[in-house]
Image (cartoon, rainbow, N blue to C red):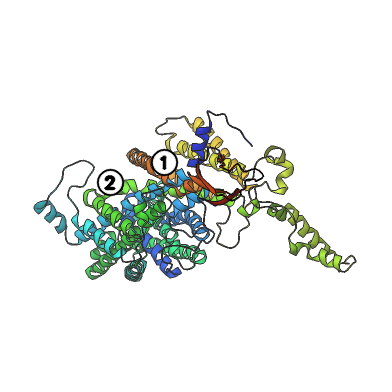
Amino acid sequence: MATHTPGCAPAVRLCQKLNRRKTLEADMMATSLKRCLSTVDLALLGVGGMVGSGLYVLTGTVAKETAGPAVVLSFLIAGVASLMAALCYAEFGARVPKTGSAYMFTYVSVGEIWAFLIGWNVILEYMIGGAAVARAWSGYLDSIFNHAIQNFTETHIMQWNVPFIAHYPDLLAAAILLLATIFISFGVRVSSWLNHIFSTISICVIVFILIFGFMLAEPANWSQKEGGFAPFGLSGIMAGTATCFYAFVGFDVIAASSEEAKNPQRAVPVATAISLALAASAYILVSTVLTLLVPWHTLDPNSALSDAFFRRGYSWAGFIVAIGSICAMNTVLLSNLFSLPRIVYAMAEDGLFFSVFSRVNPVTKVPVIAIQVFGCLMALLALIFDLEALVQFLSIGTLLAYTFVAASIIVLRFQPEKAASRSGSSNAQQEPSPTDLEPQTMAQESGELKEYESFSDKLQLVEQEKQSRERRAAGQLKARWEPYLGHVLGDCEPGEVVAFSVLALMVSGLSLCAVLVFGSGALQLPLWSISLLVVVFGLAFLLSLALIWVHEQQANTKTFQVPLVPFIPGTSILLNVFLMLKLSPLTWVRFIVWLVVGLTVYFGYGMWHSKEGQRERPPQDLAARYVVLPSGSLVETVQTVQPDAQGIVALNLTLHCCQTAGHSCRLHPVASG
C-alpha cells in the first residue's frame, strides 16, 4: 500500500473527495419519480428535442450561406457523428436508469467534481437552448405578421441600446416559456400528452412538405447554372456539418428521462435509435426538397420553407408550414423544460446542489420547485438576450458533455466488476465455468475416460478449456498480449492502465485538434512543423486507443452496449473536441466565467453536503452506556466517546464498584448509539 508524507495527506484527502464516485443502489428501478413512459413516449420526446427550429430555420441558413444544396451531405455526416454520441448515451441510459443524463453518467464512472461541472454546464445548455428556441418561436411568428409584434413593442413599451442584449424585450418569448412551465408542473403525463400532440402535428406537416415539395421539385435548381450541387466545395460541406451537428443535440432528453421509463433497459436504446433515425431522415429529406423548390442562393434564412412555398404561388402551403414550425418549436421548448429540472433534481438529490430543488410534489411526482424556478430563469434569458448571443453560447456545454460521456463509457467498460472484489469471486472468474467442465465431470462420474466420437469434439473441448483459462477480469491485460506487454503492464492494477490511457487519449486528441485548428492561423506554424505535430499527436492518440483495446472489457450482455469500444467513443471525443475549438473566443470567455461560478457553488456548498461524502464520514458522537453489577448494588456510568481521525475509538471506562471483600465487578454493555 502506498504511503504519503504528513504534508501530502491533506492534498491526498482532497483529491479523494473530488474524485469519489457515486454508489448506486442495489435496486436500480427504485425512484421517487413516476415510471410511466413507454418506448413511444421516449422516442417522441427525442424527436421533439431534435426536430424543431433547426428544421425550419437552420436548413435555409446553412444552404444559403455555407453549403448550398450539399447541405444534404452536411446533415448526413452530422447525423452519423451524432450517432456516436447517441450510442454512448443509450448504453448509459440502459445501464444506469437514473435521471441526470451526462451528469449521472460522469458521477458513476469518473468522479464527483467532473460530474458537477458537467451537470452545471448541462443546466446552462438547457436554459440557453430553451430561451433561444422561445426567441426563434417569437421571431418566426413575428415574421408571419410582418414584424408587427416587434414594432409595437419598440414603439409602445420600450427598446434598449445596450451592448450584448436584445434591442427590445421579447415579451412573447417570455410568456410562452412561462405558460409551458405551468403545463410541465402538472406532471410527466401532461408533458408527454402535450408533446404527443405537437409532435404529431409537426410530423404530419413534414410529410406534407415532402410529398407536395417533391411534386414541385425542379432538378435544374441543382444544375451548374444555379451554382451546382456543392458551390462552396468540401470546406463548405464540413463547415455546414459543424453547424448541422447542433440540430441533433436534443436526443439526450431520452437518457435524462430514463428514471421515468417503464422498461429503461430496452426503451432507452430503442427510442434513441428511432428518434435519431427519424430526425436525420427529416433533416436530409426536407433540405433536399427546399433546395429543389427554389434556387439555394435566393432562400430566406429566417423562414426558408414557408417563403419557398409563397414564392412558388402556394401561400396556403406556406401557412401550413408556419403552423408546423410553431408546433415543432413547442416540442423543443417542452423538451428543454422537461429535462432541465430533472438534471437539477439529480444534483440536489446527491447533495451537490441546493436541497430545496430535490423536493418532489407528492401528487404530480415531479420536482415542481426546480421546474418553476428554472422556467422563470429561462423566461428571463429569452426576455433580454437576442437569438444570436444565445446560440453562440449554446454549443460548448453540449460538446463538453458529449466528450465526458464518451470518456466515461471507456472508463466504465474497463472497470473491474464489483462482484470480482468479493471473496472467492476472483478465483471463480479464472476457473472454467460449469458448462465448460460438464464433459469432464460426466467422465469422472462414470469412472472412466470418455472416448470422443470425432477429432472435432476433442478440438472443441480444448478450445473451451483454453477460452476459460484466458478469460480474465475486466481491466486486466488480455491473455494473448501477455507475452508481449506483460513485462511492462503486467504489474498494474486492473483498470489502472485504461484510466491513464483515457487521460492520454483526451490530451493527445486536444493537442491534435489544436494543431489542426490553430496551426496555420493563430499559431503561424510552418507546414513541416504542422505535419510533424499532427503525426506525433495522431500516433499518441492511436497508441492510447490500442493500449485500451488490449485490456479485457466487462462481459455484460444484459443491457445495450456500444459496439467497437474504444474506437467509437474515441472518435466521438476527437470530433467533439475539434468542434469545441472551432467556437469563438468570446464563447470560451463566457464559458470560463460560468465554470468559475460553478466551482464557487461546489466548493462552497456541494462538497460539504455531498451524500457520498456523508456516507464515507464516520459518526461524530458515540454515547456508550454501561452497567456495573457488583454484589447487591448497581452503579451506572454514561460517557460520550469521540472518534479520532483514524476512526479508532478509545474507551476509557471508570468503574465504581463497591469494595466488598470476596465480590467481583462485572461490566455489561446495555446500549450504544
Report which residue position mark 2 lands on.
389
Disc 2/disc 1 C-alpha distance (Å): 18 Å
From the viewer's perspective, tell me whether residue 669 is left or right of residue 146.
Answer: right
Q: In this orientation, which residue lies closer to the viewer: 279 or 419?
A: 419
Q: Judge whether 229 appears above or below 215 on screen.
A: above
Farthest-out residue, front: 661
Q: Which amino acid does label 2 sit on?
A: Ala
Secondary structure under the numbered disc 2 in the rendered image = helix
Does residue 70 appear in this view?
no
The residue carrying pointer 1 sits among few (fewer than 14), some (14 to 19) or many (20 or more) residues within 10 Å by Cα, namely: some
The residue carrying pointer 2 sits among few (fewer than 14), some (14 to 19) or many (20 or more) residues within 10 Å by Cα, namely: some
Q: Quadrant of the N terminus?
A: top right
Spot occupied by residue 17 in the image (x, y as percentages of width and height): 49, 41
Does residue 14 appear in this view?
yes
Q: Judge whether 354 appears above or below 13 on screen.
A: below
Farthest-out residue, left: 156
Q: Do the residues labelled 2 and 1 touch (CB within 8 Å)?
A: no
Q: In this orientation, which residue lies closer to the viewer: 437 or 224?
A: 437
Q: In which quarter of the image is residue 328?
A: bottom left
Spot occupied by residue 575 in the image (x, y as percentages of width and height): 47, 47
Spot occupied by residue 530 in the image (x, y as percentages of width and height): 49, 33
Q: Which amino acid does label 1 sit on?
A: Leu
Spot occupied by residue 460 in the image (x, y as percentages of width and height): 79, 62
| Residue under the point 55% across and 36% down | 535
Secondary structure under the numbered disc 1 in the rendered image = helix
Q: In this orientation, which residue lies closer to the viewer: 494 or 52?
A: 494
Number of callouts in the render?
A: 2
The circle drawn on residue 62 is none
Report which residue position mark 1 lands on.
581
Farthest-out residue, right: 448
Decide which of tag 2 and tag 1 comes sooner along the chain: 2
